Image (cartoon, rainbow, N blue to C red):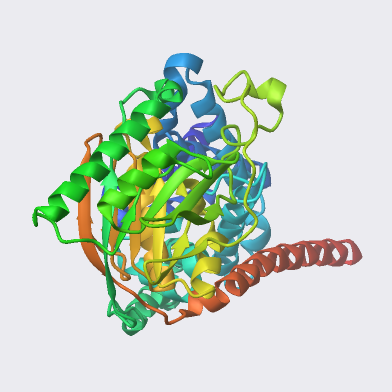
């Protein structure tokens, strides 16, 4: 390999590493823009094959550190291969779209079309294989910066578009006056600020989160179901005692984190605990072979429930089971049943939208809930599998972006932290530590306005996808036309 090629690949790797550093728990969101400036410069003038290689290096340099928490989860039992293979698979999507960059780079407004290609690879990663893995979308790293405000117009796809376009545009147009076009997303993010409101529209609710904690055992949690249940029953009893003693205000609603217990239609122990508490509770539990959130009334017990729609591949459902035994401990367990209805539950006089853990990465889950009338969003999660790494902060970043996107407060309830209360502008007003039992009580606004993103975000996503495909088609047509003219000449 020639030295210029080595330099290109080194620059692409540097850009991917900078993008990884732009994500929570760090607040270096701005690093994403120079990352895409550098990626554009690395790709400039490269052919399809070299562009694909540069895209793969960029993607691998990003995903390896971004997904390091998988190594904590599976590394002691399966070695580094699950982490390495998943990172490489995700990098292949960037590799594939970068192969088309030379095709669109000769079109007028090339940075626009190259950006739609990058958004396209995020779309594809959220669909294939096996319902995809939409982790690591550029938008999820932007919750502390101005670009995140654009989520109120077009959700995660528009935020990703804004960041990548700014980087590509600055790199492509830097020597010319046209570089001003690259600043349009920043101006737009400031212009939409008045659309983001945190004011209550239909009152407020005081919400309590029970974080019972879990042992930091990684895969050892497979045998700790009884411990998780006991921890959350204990903290619920503690909450009841603190409320009776006046140390904490009585909440209107209590939330348990994902898979804090297993239960059936009848559960006398839970009935007694919630009756003692005297507050309607959202209990996240495995019930009837579904990962569910159940409304639990202190007088009447279990009521309506929501079942998780997006099950985690190779954990909650197992594709390619014989192959899966090589890299997942769940291969010999039966598949959970996926839900089919939007996450919307009526409890404590409130319409609550639900997205369980992994679902917060998928655009449609909470969009459906908000469009159907949710006044508050709740995200129960179990991040205890992944240790003290960055995964829980990455997921909290997603929840914060959803708050802005739908104009709703979001309550994140985690088994072992970080649990958090997020205002509709994406700011965190209260949070817990990791691997500690804790109680969190705060008041959140209830809102009913439907944001532009909630109403039209799906259509904007389709338009961006269509633009990427149209740009590729136009690039192919121009190339073929040039070839024909050359032969005729």
Q: Residue furthest right?
A: 488
Q: Nearer the viewer, residue 186 or 82?
A: 82
Residue 209 coordinates in the image, percent (x, y): 28, 51
Q: Is residue 437 visible?
A: yes
Residue 260 sits above or below residue 347 on the image: above
Residue 453 coordinates in the image, percent (x, y): 50, 74
Q: Residue at x 42, y 16 (%)?
A: 76
Q: Which of 113 and 415 is in front in this view?
A: 415
Residue 404 sits above or below residue 207 on the image: below
Quadrant placement of the C terminus:
bottom right
Using residue 402 as the reference point, say whether residue 365 is left or right of it.
right
Q: Residue at x 44, y 30 (%)?
A: 70
Q: Quadrant of residue 449?
A: bottom left
Residue 256 coordinates in the image, percent (x, y): 36, 48
Q: Which of 29 and 409 is in front in this view?
A: 409
Quadrant placement of the N terminus:
top right
Q: In which quarter of the image is residue 330?
A: top right
Q: Which of 176 and 345 is in front in this view?
A: 345
Numbered circles on residues, count: 0
Residue 215 coordinates in the image, percent (x, y): 30, 26
Q: Which residue is drawn at 28% across and 47% down?
A: 210
Q: In which quarter of the image is residue 231?
A: top left
Using residue 130 as the reference point, say whether residue 83 is left or right of it.
left
């Amino acid at each position: 390999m020639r030295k210029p090629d080595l330099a290109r690949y080194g620059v692409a790797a540097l850009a991917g590493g900078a993008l990884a550093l732009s994500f929570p728990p760090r607040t270096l969101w701005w690093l994403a823009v120079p990352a895409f400036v550098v990626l554009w410069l690395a790709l400039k003038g490269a052919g399809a094959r070299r562009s694909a290689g540069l895209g793969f290096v960029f993607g691998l340099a990003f995903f390896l550190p971004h997904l390091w928490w998988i190594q904590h989860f599976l590394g002691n039992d399966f070695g580094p291969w699950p982490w390495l293979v998943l990172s490489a698979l995700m990098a292949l999507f960037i590799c594939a779209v970068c192969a088309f960059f030379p095709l669109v780079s000769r079109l007028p407004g090339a940075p626009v079309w190259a950006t739609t290609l990058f958004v396209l690879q995020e779309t594809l990663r959220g669909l294939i294989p096996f319902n995809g893995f939409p982790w690591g979308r550029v938008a999820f790293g932007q919750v502390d910066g101005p670009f995140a405000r654009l989520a109120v117009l077009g959700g995660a796809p528009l935020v990703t578009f804004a960041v990548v376009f700014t980087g590509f545009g600055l790199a492509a147009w830097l020597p010319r006056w046209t570089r001003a076009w690259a600043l349009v997303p920043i101006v737009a993010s400031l212009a939409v600020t008045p659309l983001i409101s945190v004011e209550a529209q239909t009152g407020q609710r005081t919400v309590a989160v029970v974080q019972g904690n879990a042992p930091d055992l990684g895969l050892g949690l497979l045998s700790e179901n009884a411990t998780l249940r006991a921890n959350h029953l204990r903290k619920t009893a503690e909450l009841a005692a603190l409320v009776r003693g006046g140390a904490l205000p009585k909440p209107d609603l209590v939330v348990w984190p994902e898979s804090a217990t297993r239960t059936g239609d009848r559960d006398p122990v839970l009935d007694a605990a919630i009756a003692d508490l005297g507050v309607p509770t959202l209990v996240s539990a495995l019930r009837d072979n579904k990962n569910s959130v159940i409304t639990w009334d202190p007088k009447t017990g279990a009521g309506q429930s929501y079942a998780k729609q997006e099950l985690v591949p190779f954990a909650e459902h197992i594709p390619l089971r014989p192959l899966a035994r090589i890299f997942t401990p769940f291969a010999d367990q039966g598949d959970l049943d996926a839900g089919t209805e939007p996450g919307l539950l009526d409890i404590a006089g409130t319409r609550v939208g639900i997205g369980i853990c992994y679902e917060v990465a998928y655009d449609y889950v909470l969009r459906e809930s908000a469009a159907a009338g949710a006044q508050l969003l709740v995200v129960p999660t179990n991040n205890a599998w992944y240790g003290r790494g960055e995964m829980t902060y990455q997921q909290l970043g997603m929840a914060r972006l959803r708050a802005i996107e739908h104009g709703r407060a979001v309550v994140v309830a985690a088994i072992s932290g970080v649990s958090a209360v997020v205002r509709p502008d994406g700011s965190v007003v209260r949070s817990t530590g990791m691997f500690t039992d804790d109680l969190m009580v705060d008041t959140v606004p209830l809102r009913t306005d439907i944001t532009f993103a909630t109403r039209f975000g799906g259509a904007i996503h389709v338009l961006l996808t269509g633009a990427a495909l149209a740009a590729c088609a136009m690039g192919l047509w121009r190339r073929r036309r040039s070839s024909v003219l050359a032969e005729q000449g």
